[in-house]
């Protein structure tokens, strides 16, 4: 009888232990799921877009090999841009390696392939990969992976420079055009920074994208950096160039980016004149039927 009572007690004890262990495991799993859900939906910090970001749909999404993301140059009628007569003539004068009007490698004239600075806004439209954004109370600095270039967006309340002949006017001073322009940002709300940029280089120095779309010294670019939540950012870019286009148009429409580990070591990408020369000699010219002899 004693042995039976002991066995019964041991069985009951085992069942009680199993129940408690199951309850603790289930509680831990539920707690982990709740924590993961909270982390995934963590709110965006106020007035903060800092971090290392990359295209949410993979690095290839930011290459934009067929032109700007929202309106690729693929020959489709719905992707035809609203050119002015000057804009269309300028576009046709460019000889791009990629796009509906592409030429053979020996005959293209993209300034980038002479290792000229790609400038702005093309920095957003060409190999937009891992991008570092740093900020303080006065400014936001954007560091692009390609060519290791950077630009500054002032958020200290200053006005956007006024466009004048030959450059921009800052106070009483006339300043020259810049490859990356003059940028001023203002917070539209807690999570959206709206940036206006003017004073870029004209079309004979830079292209808008890899397919040869043009810009002029009258260009004004608006960027909206909207931090959707802690880990996600959307970038919208609007082009307004009355010399080249009859109306403003959207080149990037809520382009998604995701936050990376803060310890991410961003690799370098650059244009090398010697490598470009080697490519032309070994690949570009032979593929175009050009005899270097």
Image (cartoon, rainbow, N blue to C red):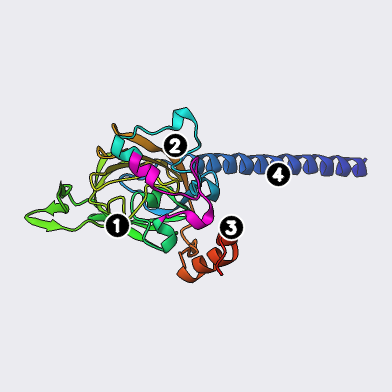
Image side of residue 43 versus residue 282, left or right: left
Instruction: Report which residue position mark 3 lands on.
Output: 289
For label 1, count other residues whose C-alpha is less than 10 Å away and answer few (under 14), some (14-19) or many (20+).
Answer: many
* Position of residue 201 measured from the top left corner of the image (x, y, whole percent): 27, 54
Question: Front-most of 276 and 185?
Answer: 276
Q: Which type of secondary structure does the marked residue at label 1 adopt?
A: loop
Location of mark 4 (residue): 21
Q: Secondary structure at mark 4?
A: helix
The answer to whether the residues at label 3 and label 2 have Cβ atoms under 8 Å apart is: no
Question: Looking at the rendered structure, which numbered label has been put on residue 56?
Answer: none
In-front residue for pair 173/49: 173
**Residue at mark 4 to residue at mark 2: CA–CA distance:** 54 Å
Whether residues under marks 3 and 4 lie with C-beta atoms below 8 angstroms apart, the answer is no
Rendered location of residue 83, percent (x, y):
33, 34
Q: Nearer the viewer, residue 172 or 205?
A: 205
Image height of 212 relative to 151, above or below: above
Q: Nearer the viewer, mark 4 or mark 2?
A: 2
Answer with mark 4 or mark 2, whichever residue precedes in sequence: 4
Q: Exactly how many numbered labels are in the figure?
A: 4
What residue is shown with label 2?
70
Residues tagged 1 and 3 counted as in contact (Cβ below 8 A): no
> Of circles 3 and 2, which is in front?
3
Mark 1 = which residue? 179
């Amino acid at each position: 009888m004693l042995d039976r009572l002991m066995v019964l007690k041991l069985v009951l004890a085992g069942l009680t232990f199993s129940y408690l262990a199951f309850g603790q495991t289930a509680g831990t799993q539920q707690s982990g799921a709740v924590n993961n859900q909270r982390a995934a939906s963590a709110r965006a910090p106020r007035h903060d877009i800092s971090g290392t970001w990359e295209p949410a749909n993979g690095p290839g999404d930011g290459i934009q090999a067929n032109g700007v993301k929202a309106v690729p140059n693929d020959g489709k009628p719905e992707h035809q841009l609203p050119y002015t007569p000057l804009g269309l003539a300028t576009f046709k004068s460019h000889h791009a390696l990629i796009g509906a009007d592409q030429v053979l490698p020996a005959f293209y004239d993209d300034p980038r392939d002479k290792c000229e600075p790609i400038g702005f806004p093309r920095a957003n439209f060409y190999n937009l990969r891992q991008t570092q954004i740093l900020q303080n109370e006065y400014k936001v600095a954007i560091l692009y992976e390609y060519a290791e270039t950077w630009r500054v967006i002032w958020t200290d309340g200053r006005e956007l420079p006024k466009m004048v002949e030959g450059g921009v006017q800052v106070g009483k001073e006339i300043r020259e055009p810049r490859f990356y322009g003059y940028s001023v940002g203002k917070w539209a709300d807690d999570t959206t920074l709206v940036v206006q940029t003017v004073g870029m280089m004209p079309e004979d120095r830079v292209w808008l994208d890899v397919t040869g779309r043009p810009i002029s010294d009258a260009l004004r670019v608006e960027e909206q950096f909207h931090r959707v939540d802690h880990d996600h950012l959307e970038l919208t870019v609007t082009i307004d160039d009355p010399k080249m286009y009859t109306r403003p148009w959207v080149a990037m429409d809520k382009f998604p980016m995701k936050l990376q580990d803060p310890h991410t070591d961003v690799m370098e990408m650059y244009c090398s004149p010697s490598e470009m020369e080697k490519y032309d000699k070994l690949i570009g010219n032979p593929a175009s039927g050009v005899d270097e002899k």
